[in-house]
Structures are given as C-alpha cells and as structure tokens.
Amino acid sequence: MFGTLNSGANAYAKVSVETGVAAASPHKLIVMLFDGALAAIANANAQMKFGDIAGKGKSISKAISIIDSGLRASLDKSAGGSIAANLDSLYEYMSNRLLQANLHNQPQLLDEVSGLLKDLKASWEAIGETPAQPQPAAPTPVLQNDPLAPHTARLVKA
C-alpha cells in the first residue's frame, strides 16, 4: 500500500536531483554529469565484485550513456578547437574502456576511467572557482566649472 522504504528514499533522491538540475548553472550541470558517471562506475565496481552481472551491466551502461550523451554531447567542437576534439577522443576512449570492463569483468578498467573522470572533474571545478576578473571602474570626470561646487572665494569665514 505505501511502498517500500527504499522506494521512498529513491523518490526523495529523484526530487533532489531534479531540483538541483533545475537550479544549476551550465557549469554545475557538467559537474553533476561527472558525479553521475563516477557514481555509476562505483556501483558497477561493487556489483562486479559481488557477481551481480545484470546490475553491473546496467551501471556500466548508465556511465557510458552519461559520458556519450551528456559529456560528449555538450562539447562545442566548432568553438572548442583542439581542446574539444581531444576531450571528444578521451570520452570515446573512456566509453570503450567501460565496454571492455563489462565484457571481460576487469575492475582495473573501471578504476582507470574513474581516475580520468576525477581528474577532469577537478579541472572543471577549478575553472568554475576562478572568479571573473572585475572590470576597472571608469574614471569619474572632473568638472572644471561646476556651478554647484563650493568656491573658496565665495566662502565667508565666521
């Protein structure tokens, strides 16, 4: 009638993620994609160790989907130049390594991709922490003949 405790926790987690996505900047969305891929790989690693073949496959597929449909798809190759092209190749490499990890039950490949994602995430977060350089304030023009400015010649000493 009321569902399980686990389904209730999943519902709250889903609302939290949806709220976070709605309120996130484009930069934060990329960080969330990194977090999602890392969580899926961690789940796959645990499932691989416990022999949960179906769960492992589902988690690895989720990580590949996040990398391909999220991180890779967000690259602007026309504006990003060689950096975007290199990231595209790296994301493709990661997806292939995850596929190999799934096919051959190789946790070291999961660890390799996880390490690459952690490095990229740290770099991405460092970029986001750099505050924008403030623009210098325009100098205030000094008016030579301001009719409202006090003139020392007009002041009377008491």
Image (cartoon, helix red, strand yellow):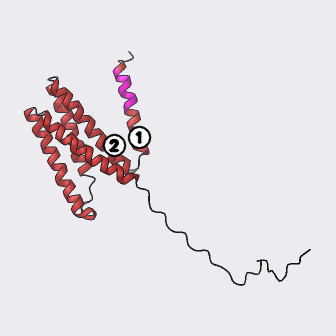
Secondary structure found at label 2: helix
Q: Position of residue 21 (x, y in %)?
A: 39, 43
Q: Position of residue 23 (x, y in %)?
A: 44, 44
Q: CA distance from mark 1 to mark 2?
A: 9 Å
Judged left or right of residue 87, residue 100 is: left
> Which residue is most to the front?
158
**Quadrant where the image shows the C terminus:** bottom right
- The three-letter amino acid code for the residue at tag 2 is Met
Secondary structure found at label 1: helix
1 and 2 marks in contact (CB < 8 Å)? yes
Q: Choose top left, top right, bottom left or bottom right for residue 140.
A: bottom right
Judged left or right of residue 144, residue 16 is: left
How packed mark 2 is, by other alpha carbons closer than 10 Å (few <14, some 14-19, many 20 or more), is some
Give the residues drawn in magenta, as a range. Answer: 6-13
Residue at screen point 23% across, 60% down? 83
Q: Position of residue 45 (x, y in %)?
A: 19, 31
Above or below — where is 105 with respect to 35? Answer: above
Earlier sequence position, callout 1 versus callout 2:
1
Q: Choose top left, top right, bottom left or bottom right for residue 37.
A: top left
Q: What residue is disc 1 on?
A: 20
Q: What residue is disc 2 on?
A: 32
Does residue 70 appear in this view? Answer: no
